[in-house]
Image (cartoon, helix red, strand yellow):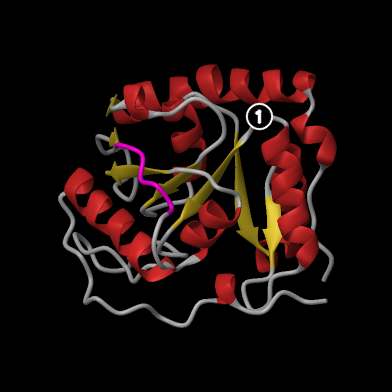
Amino acid sequence: MPVEYDPNAFSPFRTAIYMATARYFFGSIFWYQNKLEFSGRENIPEGPCVFVSNHLSNWDPPLVSRVVDRPVSYLAKKELYSDKFFRNLVLAYGAISIDRERPEKSTFKAVKEMLSKGWCLGMFIEGTRSKTPGILGQPNMGPAYFAKTNKLPLVPVGIVGTNIKRGKVIVKIGKPIQAEGSLDEISWKVMAALSELTGFQLPPKELKDNADTAQIKE
């Protein structure tokens, strides 16, 4: 399946719309509904980076975008694009599809194009929403891989509360982590940072098989 993304989403005009939506539409929802609290924005480096977060609910992507106050493109598994409404929505806001079983070269090219426009990459290191309260899921190596291949720092973003309806939401942004060492080492550095930011327990130290490091299709 060819990568799906809208290169026009990264234009200055569309970027301005993206930021206005994150700040004023989603920002109002989070302030009113969740009494949002966040900290650590001073830790965000200049230029593109990879924002890496834990994952609790479908609200997490717009929440991260609002809190970091930067245009962020998220990698979305290809299965999500089967829903026409969702597909059109995420494409309009810069998402890039990925085949987690065997990533396409075109996905990596799309990421490089997005980064060249000054956007940041957003990824959820657990790959899916956490299933056990208070415990982080097993990490995927995708964030470490994309950060290392693009020579970008990873910025951990800890989220607490989005899985509780109308609950208080707290977001903490950690210090940048350089993509140095093996993908395993980088991934667990990010996990340790997310555990400290959220107060959630780390999972047993083992990396599950991960599509993000599978061979890229020719």
Q: Farthest residue to the bottom: give it.
A: 209
Residue depicted at 21% across the width and 54% down the height: 195
Q: Of 106 and 71, which appears nearest the observer?
A: 106
- Tell me if residue 120 is in the magenta stretch: no
Three-letter residue code for mark 1 = Gly
Residue linked to disc 1: 118
Question: Is residue 59 visible to us here?
Answer: no
- Depth check: 157 or 178 in front? 178
Tell me if mark 1 has few (under 14), some (14-19) or many (20+) residues whose alpha carbon lies within 10 angstroms of its own: some
For the residue pair 173 and 83, the one nearer the viewer reads as 173
The boundaries of the magenta stretch are: 175-179
Q: Quadrant of the C terminus?
A: bottom right
The overriding secondary structure of the stretch rendered in magenta is loop
Secondary structure under badge 1? loop
Judge whether 64 appears above or below 110 on screen: above
Left or right: residue 138 compared with residue 71:
left
Q: Is residue 176 magenta?
A: yes
Is residue 148 placed above or below 214 in the rendered structure?
A: above
Left or right: residue 146 versus residue 27 is right
Residue that extends furthest to the front in the rendered view of this protein? 181
Image x and y of residue 107, in percent: 74, 59
Residue at 75 percent across and 65 percent down: it is 82
Which residue is painted at 32% across and 68% down in the image?
137
Q: Is residue 181 left or right of residue 101?
A: left
Q: Position of residue 192 (x, y in %)?
A: 23, 56
The spot of residue 176 in percent (x, y) is 36, 39
Determine which quarter of the picture holds residue 60: top left
> Is residue 89 rendered to the left or right of residue 23?
right
- As drawn, 53 above or below 93: below
- Tell me where residue 18 appears, x and y as whole percent: 65, 26
